[in-house]
Image: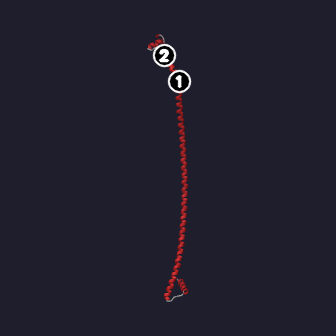
Amino acid sequence: MVFLLASSGGFGGLFTALGLNTQAFLLNTAAFLVTAFIVGKWVFPPLTRALDAKKDELEAATRLEQEAGQKLDLASDQAAQVVREARKAAEEILSIARSDGATQIEAAQKKAREQADRLVAEAREQLSRDVLTARRELKSETAKLVALATEQVLEEKLDPKRDGDMIERSLAAK
């Protein structure tokens, strides 16, 4: 480079050899430096702050999303636990209901058996009473028929005392 500078007469010779205007180069360089200073002083800091704020906001959103995911997992676990507890409680209630139902059925069956036994006993008692009544009526009718048959055989009317005695003997003989 020293060779190029020496043979061309300094910086101006080098720029001239390259086809550049030294004055325009210096003005463009100054304009670039002023623009770089202005952009570096007033444009980049707000952009950097905005980008940092956006980055912080995205990090916060990511952190919130992770926390929400953890809370969702926790809520899902709690919901599953509540469902398990509810199912367990429902099973206990069903078990109690089945047990109570079985007890009530047994009580109803026992009551029905007792009522049936009572009805059968009452029916037997009524039947015994009816049989006794029928026997008494039959005995009375038989006594009347024997008295009537005796009157027909003897061809005379007997008094009630003699009728009674004769009927008693007749019935006792059988």
Q: Which residue lies furthest to the left in this view?
A: 19
Q: Which residue is drawn at 54% across and 56% down?
A: 97
Q: Which residue is drawn at 53% across and 32% down?
A: 57
Tell me the residue that label 2 is attached to: 27
Q: Residue furthest bottom?
A: 155
Q: Are marks 1 and 2 in contact (CB under 8 Å)?
A: no
Q: Residue at x 55, y 53 (%)?
A: 93
Q: In this view, does 118 lie above or below 172?
A: above
Tell me the residue that label 1 is attached to: 42
Instruction: Inspect the image, locate mark 2, and give the three-letter code of the amino acid beneath it.
Output: Leu
Place residue 99 in its image quadrant.
Answer: bottom right
Dot placed on the residue nearer the N-terminal end, 1 or 2: 2
Q: In this view, does 174 lie above or below 39?
A: below
Picture coordinates of residue 87, whole percent (x, y): 53, 50
Give how far apart the Cα atoms at labels 1 and 2 are: 22 Å
Q: Nearer the viewer, residue 1 or 82?
A: 82
Instruction: Inspect the image, locate mark 1, and give the three-letter code of the amino acid beneath it.
Output: Trp
Q: Which residue is drawn at 53% across and 39% down?
A: 68
* Scheme of colours in the image: secondary structure
Residue 151's tag is none
**Mark 2 surroundings: few (<14), some (14-19) or many (≥20) residues within 10 A:** few
SS at circle 1 = helix
